[in-house]
Structures are given as C-alpha cells and as structure tokens.
Image (spheres, rainbow, N blue to C red):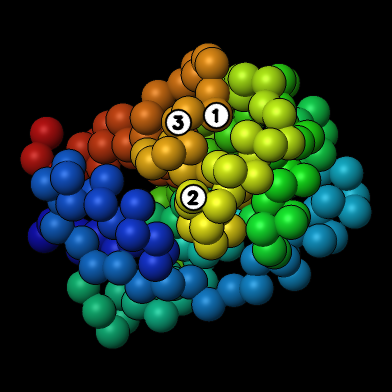
Amino acid sequence: MTPKLILASSSPFRRMLMENAGLSFEAHAARIDERAVEAPLEKAGAKPDAVALVLARAKAEEVSSRFPSSRFPKSLVIGSDQTMSLGDNVFHKPTNLADAARHLQVLSGVTHRLNSAVAIVSDGVVLWEHLAHAELTMRPLTMDFISRHLARVGERALSSVGAYQLEGEGIQLFEKIEGDYFTILGLPMLPLLKKLRELGAIDG
C-alpha cells in the first residue's frame, strides 16, 4: 500500500512546491515553539544549518505523533525548515519595518547563506534527512533605497528572514545567487523526490 504523504507545514510556498510537483498530500502545521527549540541550540553554539535540521526533524516528529500507523494508514511526514546566516549569526524574521531596514543594512553588499533542511518521519522514526545551501550576494544598498523599497513592499518584508522575498520585488536587492530555486524557497525538492521514489511513496 502506498504510504500517505503529510507536509508538516502551513507555508503556502512549500505547499505550492509540492502541488506543482504533482504530489498528493495533506498539510498539517507542526505544533512546536520554534524559538524554544532554537534558543538552547544557539546558546550551545550550534551552527545555523544544524539548527535548521533539528527544526525540520522536530516538526516532522510532532506531526507524525498525531498519525500513528496503529490508527491511520502508514504516513510519511515531511518536515522542513530554513535558517538564514551571515557567518555564524542566525537571522530571524524582522519584528517591524525598522527591524527590516536594519536587516537590509547589515546584508547590503555582502554574501549570506540560506540553510534549508528537510526530514521524513514515519511513526516517530526519522527515515531520512537532508541539508542544502544557497549563497546570496546582496548588492550595496543606500538607506534611501531601503526606505523606498520597504515603503513599496510593506509588511510583506516581515514574512521571511532577511526581510525579502526573491519571488517578488526582493529579487531587485541581489547581484548574485548560487543555489537552486527550491532550496531558496525552503524545500529542497530534488533530493526529496528522489527519496520518496526510493521509499515507494511516488511513481518511480
């Protein structure tokens, strides 16, 4: 029997990526406090990509605990998370537009990294996990431009780490991007699809 796929996320972008790939799945947001998971890791000096991997795993495990095979058909729960880092410093979503402006000032003219993790869990057991990276170089930005840019995009700037969305006007902030589209949007689809084929969850 083909296992059921469950995406442990409420992200419209991750749902879009899976829908566009032709996958049949359910989506259930993980009930975890991400900051409570991150805080001790960061205090212990965990690298930003390790934080992303722990969060992806935690999301999948939490949702998997609600769909045990004793009560439901076998399910493969896909958890994912993304951190943004400049060196060893992890960025979080800006809390307001002034905070977004500070983020863009810090990122102006330098290269930062997006760390995208994905994990598959079934019956609480981690079957597979993967980490992918993208390197993004922002062009030098003046404060005047940052102010005008944030005035145009408004509170959309608060919905993602780094205060930008590459799928929208945020693309204008960059001069160089190294990494695949799926990693940048927060779900490394190619390795995920390969693993789902190996697990017999999708047509291979």
Residue 85 % position (x, y): 71, 36
Q: Quadrant of residue 3?
A: bottom left
Disc 3/disc 2 C-alpha distance (Å)? 14 Å
Q: Earlier in the sequence, mark 3 or mark 2?
A: 2
Callout 2: few (<14), some (14-19), or many (20+) C-alpha neighbours within 10 Å? few
Does the residue at mark 1 contact the one at mark 3 (Cβ under 8 Å)?
Answer: yes
Mark in the foreground, 3 or 2? 2
The mark tally for this picture is 3
The amino acid type of the residue labelled 3 equals Ile
Residue 175 % position (x, y): 54, 16
As helix, strand or loop, the secondary structure at mark 3 comes to helix
Residue 69 visible to the viewer:
yes
**171 and 87: which one is in front?**
171
Q: Earlier in the sequence, mark 1 or mark 2?
A: 2
Q: Where is mark 1, residue-wise?
A: 173
Residue 61 % position (x, y): 50, 65
Point 48% across, 51% down: residue: 153
The numbered mark at residue 152 is 2
* Drawn side of residue 141 relative to residue 168, left or right: right
As helix, strand or loop, the secondary structure at mark 1 comes to helix
